[in-house]
Image (cartoon, rainbow, N blue to C red):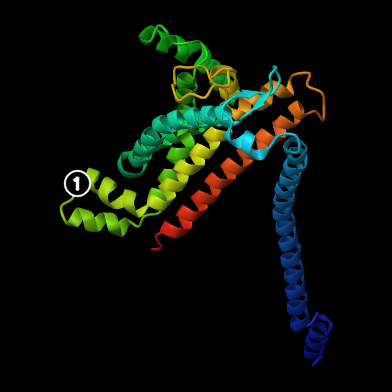
Amino acid sequence: MDRGIRTGESLMGAPPIAGRIQRRRQSKVIEERLVRWIFASCALVSVVTTIGIVVLLLNQSIGFFQEVSVWEFLTGTRWSPILKPNSFGVLPLVSGTLLVAVIAAAVAIPVGLATAIFLSEYAPDRVRRIIKPALEILAGIPTIVYGYFALSFVTPLLQKVMPDLLIFNALSAGIVMGLMIIPMVSSLSEDAMLAVPRSLRQAAYALGATRLEVALHVVVPAALSGIVAAFILGLSRAIGETMLVTLAAGATPRMTFNPLDSIQTMTAYIVQLSHGETPHGSVEYNTIFAVGLVLFIMTLAMNMLGQWVVQHYRETY
């Protein structure tokens, strides 16, 4: 009898199970709301930063375009904002930027795609564990080191083949930039290939296809959207690169498509003028923001193209 009373008292003194469950649910709801607000705040920071950059570029560019017509800026073939007579045609900077980016793409796209195919289809785990960290180290090297590498190693090497090659040229800058973006192209392309279901490979092998045929005719077409997006993101990185082209490509704004010439890119011009003594608020100073606006639009267009390719050609398995 006494034992039953003591048991009943202990049950009456313990917290009700329903109450504990209710408090646990409330704490989970609070945690979920807190985590949601933290994630939303992080996303909001990126949005606010992007809006701030756009507002700054537009605000500073308006002062420039009040003195220089947009048509002259976009179609002019001579860029001389400091030396008299002043000319504000941005096409020499755009052509120099695109020239280096095209050379970089000619190096990075085939090498990066071949590397991705090897890692995803051929390399055993032991080899992959060696190559992947090497690519990550290559991606972590500062770009200014790539610039000195192009200036002191690649250019003298090219001059042995082409004695008339200038010290500052678009060819060496584009080649080294291609080496720099190979990790991005190969890593993103490999991720896209690894997402292809194993059943597609097995079906191709069952039909008698070789490993090369499976890689080129099954895996690559199935992962084409991710591969193209990797190419576009790599080109966006090449277009926005600064220190490498500042050191290796030169500072001569020239409307040319000859890779042996010395050229100047948009980013290199921004660096050059930022270190000068141009008066703040002058039309020469505001050219920095006008060129930056063009560069922003170009990279934004490349990223939007990449997003469209991924969404339009994505394969769902």
Residue at the location (44% across, 59% down)?
Answer: 312
- From the viewer's perspective, tell me whether residue 8 is left or right of residue 310: right
Tell me: 187 left or right of 14: left
Q: Please tell me in which quadrant of the rendered image residue 196 appears.
A: bottom left
| Quadrant in which the N terminus appears | bottom right
Closest to the observer: 165 or 232? Answer: 165
Residue 115's place in the image compared with 211, above or below, is above
Give left or right: position of 146 versus 114.
right
Q: Amino acid at mark 1?
A: Thr
* Residue 295: x %, y % from top left: 61, 37
Residue reaching furthest to the left:
208
Residue 97 falls in image quadrant: top right
Residue under pointer 1: 210
Residue 194 visible to the viewer: no
Q: Secondary structure at mark 1?
A: loop
Instruction: Provide residue 292's location: percent of width, then percent of height.
Output: 66, 35
How many dots with numbers? 1
- Extreme residue toward the bottom, this view: 1
Nearest the viewer among 285 and 49 is 285
- Residue located 80% across and 80% down the image: 14
Camera-nearest residue between 45 and 64: 64
Q: Visible in this render: residue 277?
A: yes
Q: Height in image: 103 above or below 46?
A: above
